Each structure stands twice: as C-alpha cells, then as structure tokens.
C-alpha cells in the first residue's frame, strides 16, 4: 500500500509552488492513500520487456526556413501583464539581498 | 429555426431564406432566454458575433464563394485562445485574460466564416467529467437541470442540447468531448491525435489533448471537422497529411461489409442496464444495415484508467507551471519586498481549484526521482500495451465500438467528493486518447430506468477518421427512422419552443 504523509504533501506543494493550508495538506494526504493504490495497478503489467510510449506519434524535430514572420508587438505581448515598466514585465524580487 | 441542423441552416443561408445576422440573433436571443438556467456560457460576444455575421452576409450579397458552414453560429470551449476575447479555462488564475492571438482552431473558424457566439464553461483546465470543477459554477444538463452535462466540455454539450448553438468546439484529453456528448444526447468527435492543431489550445496533457467538433448530427460534426482540421506549422505534432474525407463518409453512411468490433472489456459489469440495452440495440441496427459484428478483446484496457491518472497529472504538473503570476493572469501577494517565489505560491493557492491542485501534486509525485519508474515509467509501458491491443483489434475489425460511458448523467454534487468515482466516468473513453486514435460518441437512445440519454462510442484507427463517420451516420439514420424524430425532441422544452 502506498501513502503520502502530510509532510510529503507539504514538500510536493513546495516543489509545485502552491501554498497550502494545514487542512488541505491533511485532506490531500488522506486522498492520496486511495488514489495511489488505484494508480499503482500499472505496475502489475509494466514488465521490463515492455517498451515505454511517451507520445502517440513518432516525434521528430520540425524545421522551417528561417524567415521573419509577423509576431506580437511589445504592447500585445505585455497586454496581459500583471505589472509592467519601461516596456518590460515587472516582477517581484527574484534574487536575494546579497 | 434554432432547432434545425447546421446543414439545414447552411442551405437556408445559401438560398437567401435567412441571413447570418438573423440566425446569429436568434441564437443570442435563445442564450438570453435559457442560459440563466443552463449556464453553458462564460462569455457571450454579442457585438463581435453580430459584426462577424453582418460581414459574412455582405460577402454573400456580393456573390463571393463561401465555405459550407459560412454564417453558422458556434460555441467555443473556453480553453481555446481567441484574440481579444476573455479566455479563462474555467480558472480564476486566468480571470480577465484576453489573449493577444488566435488559436489555429479559431483562425480556421474565422477563415470558414463560422460565427463565434462566445466561450463555453468547462472543468478548470479541462480536468473533470462534470463541469463542476469550473471556478465559475457548474453547467446544468438541459435534460434535467439537477444533473451534470458531462465534462470537461459540459458547456459546449449543454449549449447544443439547449439549442443555444448548432455547433461547438470541444477538447478531449480523456473523454471531454465524447462523455459530455453521451450524457446530453449530442454528437462529439475526438479526431486522430495531430489531426487538428493544438496551437492556442491551453495545454493540460499535451500528448493526449485533441480538439474536435461537437454538434447535434453526424453530418454537422463532419462539416465542422473538415473546417478545423489540417496540418499546422505552428504545432510540431500536427500530422502533415490530407484531412480524412469525413463529410463524404457522413453523407454516404455505408457500412455494408464493414467489420465492427465489440470490445469485450468495455461492457458488462459496472455498466448501467439501460446503457447496455441501448448498446445491444444499436449493434442489431448496424447488423441490419449490413455490417458484420465481431467480438474483440483488449486485455490491457483495464489498466488504462490507472495509467491515465499518472500520465495526465504528470504532464499537467509541467504544463501548468507556466501560470507563475509573472507575465499574464492573476498575481497575488505582490507587496513591497515579497519574493517572486512567495508571489507564485500565493497566486497558485488562490488561482487554482481543488482538482487542479490534486493533479499537480499527484503529477509532481509521479515524476519525482525515486518514484518515476514505479509510476510515470510504468504508466508509459501500459500505454504501449494499450496501443498494441488496438493494433491487434484493428486486424480483426474496421472500427471498434462500446458504450461511451458506464452510466447516464448523474446528479450535480453526487460524486464531487469522491475523485475515484468521478474518474470512472472515463473508463471507456480513455484508451482512445492513450493510443492517439479517433473516437466518436453519438446518441443511441434513452435508458429505460431514468429516461436519460445514452452514448454509443465508435473508435477508428489513426487517420481513418472517415470510418467512424460512416458507422455513425448509418446508426444515426437507423435510429432516426426507428424514433421518427431526433432524440433531442424528447428533451424538456426550455424557454418556449421556436
């Protein structure tokens, strides 16, 4: 039986950049016990001799000739920005003080 | 007028018996009269739709050659970017966002002069089977307003069933076009993966997502299919091959000599009695129409649901990382001195709903080192086995069939707190997405026990989409002559008949 503790969920939420309340962490931890048991069934048939499929199509690089085509104007690209400054996205502080 | 098929409306437009402006206005009036109850739409673009319709009427008056669906109104699932029009994906995190570009599907609709009425409700980021996961409230099934219209594309299916639009666009990652079609008595088609461009379709699970047509008849779906399909240089997974001749197939509806494979594993226990009865009846009608019914086995399909709920959350955890509060959408907690990371954490807490968070966390776990092989890696192997099952089955049959869903529409709220029960809705539709093949659902009647619509699913091999249209058209014609009128005539009349 697989399970995820409240602390496991908290760590995953941190990795996924989602703030979670204590109640949410506990609820998800309980749900995951059931969900992980259900999805772990894939292991029953996933033998070493079976190849993995990541995509329904044989993926390959698609190239085109390097021709300039019309693209978004700076105004259009910034039209949905939560904040902007000097024709740039204004974002919160990314680096530390030092 | 609004109860006609899109093909009938198109004939009237060509004959000059009606204008696109009048047709569009009739649907806008219908939306105004019934959508407070149905809640199929998140945004209605009255001005834009009427302007587009007027421009099409002007072109027609000048004698310009127009596409077969020119002037017909359509409802667009809110997961498709449309320039300047709010696109929320049913999520708070995109509230107020107006894309600066058109998705390729929208560009194709505009090129074909199809009038876009507005954006339809959906489960947040297409994650769900009931449209209850929309941040903007659920959509109601026109057959019974206390029931779900399916999901994730419940807004599109409900708009069709309530005669708010004759055509709609859906997207199908695990059944989000076909299951809503089944529970609302409408037609929905998931084309072959790569058949319709994903450019501008907000990504949930990129290796599974596929846009497709929703309509009230097989021919209408085919006409819309050909309008939106085709190679797109902006989507590297778009198939560079001619579009399957689905309109010709829908018009002929010839199944003589075709082998139709009944998938043994997608029937039986767990399927409602009325669903099974309608399925058996449809098989008899197809046999009478000249098809040969054979049984096929797909032993690995029983693992499809488990594999799907690892693959889709894994891809979603990666795809939804783009909602980082930096370049567009919601931003929360941007106070002086707050770090970018804290703004991201707070924004995603407020912006995402419960199911989206659940899947992001599950996907993050399935992809994490130490668990990758056991979960995501194993799921990818199951995907290979499912594809092999299809390949084997298609050596014995030209198309495969099953009920679309195990049950008819359930009550709103009934399964909202049981994620696993909710996931079971997609048990018969998921294998198609895993293999990237085509799938269609069309109405096969009403279940005796509850009087609600039942869907019949047809699956066709990669880029042989025309086969499901042939079979769908044959079954539709046989059922129509049995019923004497379209199934939707049995649905409750809303807002007065027109």
Image: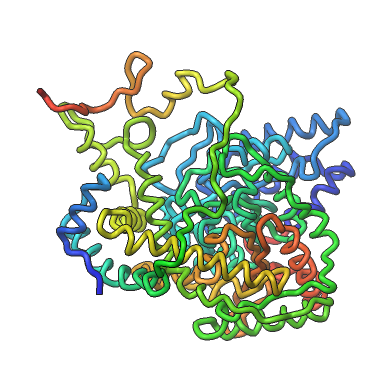
Q: Check the image and tell me how it is coloured.
A: rainbow
Q: Residue at x 85, y 47 (%)?
A: B12
**Screen quadrant of the C terminus of chain B:** bottom right
- Of residues B364 and A91, which is closer to you in this image? B364
Q: Is residue B193 visible?
A: yes
Q: Residue at x 32, y 57 (%)?
A: B372
- Of residues B442 and B410, which is closer to you in this image? B442
Q: How many marks?
A: 0
Q: Where is residue B434 shown, x and y percent of the image?
A: 52, 61
Q: Residue furthest top?
A: A86
In the rendered image, which quarter is residue B323 located in?
top left
Q: Is residue B354 visible?
A: no
Question: Relative to residue A65, is residue B481 drawn left or right?
Answer: right
Q: Where is residue B158 shown, x and y percent of the image?
A: 58, 59
Please determine whether, in this image, residue B460 is positioned above or below residue B16. Answer: below
Q: Residue at x 22, y 37 (%)?
A: B341
Q: Residue furthest front?
A: A49
Question: Relative to residue B416, is residue B55 drawn left or right?
Answer: right
Q: Where is residue B41 shown, x and y percent of the image?
A: 54, 49
Please determine whether, in this image, residue B164 is positioned above or below residue A38. Answer: above
In the rendered image, which quarter is residue B137 located in?
bottom left
Question: Relative to residue B458, is residue B20 drawn left or right?
Answer: right
Q: Where is residue B171 shown, x and y percent of the image?
A: 56, 52
Q: Residue at x 14, y 27 (%)?
A: A96
């Amino acid at each position: 039986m697989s399970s995820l503790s409240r602390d496991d969920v908290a760590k995953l939420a941190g990795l996924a950049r989602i703030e979670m309340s204590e109640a949410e962490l506990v609820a998800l931890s309980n749900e995951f016990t059931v969900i992980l048991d259900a999805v772990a069934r894939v292991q029953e048939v996933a033998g070493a001799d079976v190849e993995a499929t990541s995509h329904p199509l044989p993926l390959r690089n698609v190239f085109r000739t390097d021709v300039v085509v019309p693209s978004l104007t700076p105004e259009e690209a910034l039209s949905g920005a939560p904040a902007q400054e000097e024709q740039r996205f204004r974002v919160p502080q990314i680096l530390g003080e030092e | 007028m609004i109860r006609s098929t899109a093909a009938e409306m198109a004939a009237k437009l060509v004959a000059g018996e009606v204008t696109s402006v009048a047709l569009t206005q009739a649907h806008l009036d219908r939306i105004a009269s019934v959508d407070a109850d149905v809640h199929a739409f998140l945004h209605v673009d009255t001005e834009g739709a009427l302007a587009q319709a007027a421009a099409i009427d002007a072109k027609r008056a000048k004698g310009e050659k127009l596409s077969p669906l020119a002037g017909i109104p359509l409802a667009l699932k809110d997961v498709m970017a449309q320039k300047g029009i709010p696109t929320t994906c049913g999520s708070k995190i995109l509230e107020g966002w107006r894309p600066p570009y058109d998705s390729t599907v929208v560009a194709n609709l505009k090129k074909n002069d199809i009038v876009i009425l507005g954006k339809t409700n959906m489960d947040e980021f297409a994650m769900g089977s009931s449209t209850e996961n929309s941040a903007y409230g659920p959509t109601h099934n026109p057959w019974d307003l206390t029931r779900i219209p399916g999901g994730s594309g419940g807004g599109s299916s409900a708009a069709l069933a309530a005669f708010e639009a004759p055509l709609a666009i859906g997207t199908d990652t695990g059944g989000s076009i076909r299951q809503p079609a089944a529970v609302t008595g409408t037609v929905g088609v998931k084309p072959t993966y790569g058949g319709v461009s994903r450019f501008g379709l907000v990504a949930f699970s990129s290796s599974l997502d596929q846009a497709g047509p929703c309509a009230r008849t097989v021919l209408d779906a085919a006409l819309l299919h050909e309008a939106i399909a085709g190679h797109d240089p902006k989507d590297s997974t778009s198939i560079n091959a001619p579009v399957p001749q689905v309109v010709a197939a829908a018009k002929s509806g010839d199944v003589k000599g075709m082998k139709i494979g009944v998938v043994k594993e997608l029937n039986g226990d767990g399927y409602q009695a009325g669903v099974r009865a309608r399925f058996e009846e449809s098989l008899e009608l197809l046999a009478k129409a000249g098809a040969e019914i054979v049984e096929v086995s797909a032993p690995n399909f029983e693992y499809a649901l488990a594999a799907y709920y690892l693959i889709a959350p894994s891809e979603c955890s990666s795809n939804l990382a783009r909602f980082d509060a930096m370049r567009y959408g919601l931003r929360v907690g941007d106070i002086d001195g707050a770090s970018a990371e804290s703004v991201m954490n707070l924004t995603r807490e407020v912006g995402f709903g419960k199911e989206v968070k659940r899947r992001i966390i599950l996907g993050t776990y399935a992809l994490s080192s130490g668990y990758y092989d056991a979960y995501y890696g194993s799921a990818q192997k199951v995907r290979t086995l499912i594809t092999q099952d299809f390949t084997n089955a298609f050596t014995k049959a030209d198309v495969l069939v099953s009920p679309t869903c195990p049950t008819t529409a359930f009550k709103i709220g009934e399964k909202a707190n049981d994620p696993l029960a909710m996931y079971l809705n997609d048990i018969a539709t998921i294998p198609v997405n895993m293999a990237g093949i085509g799938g269609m659902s069309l109405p096969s009647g009403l279940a005796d026990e509850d009087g609600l619509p039942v869907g019949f699913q047809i699956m066709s091999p990669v880029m042989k989409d025309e086969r499901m249209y042939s079979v769908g058209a044959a079954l539709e014609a046989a059922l129509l002559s049995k019923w004497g009128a379209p199934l939707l005539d049995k649905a409750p009349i809303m807002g007065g008949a027109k």
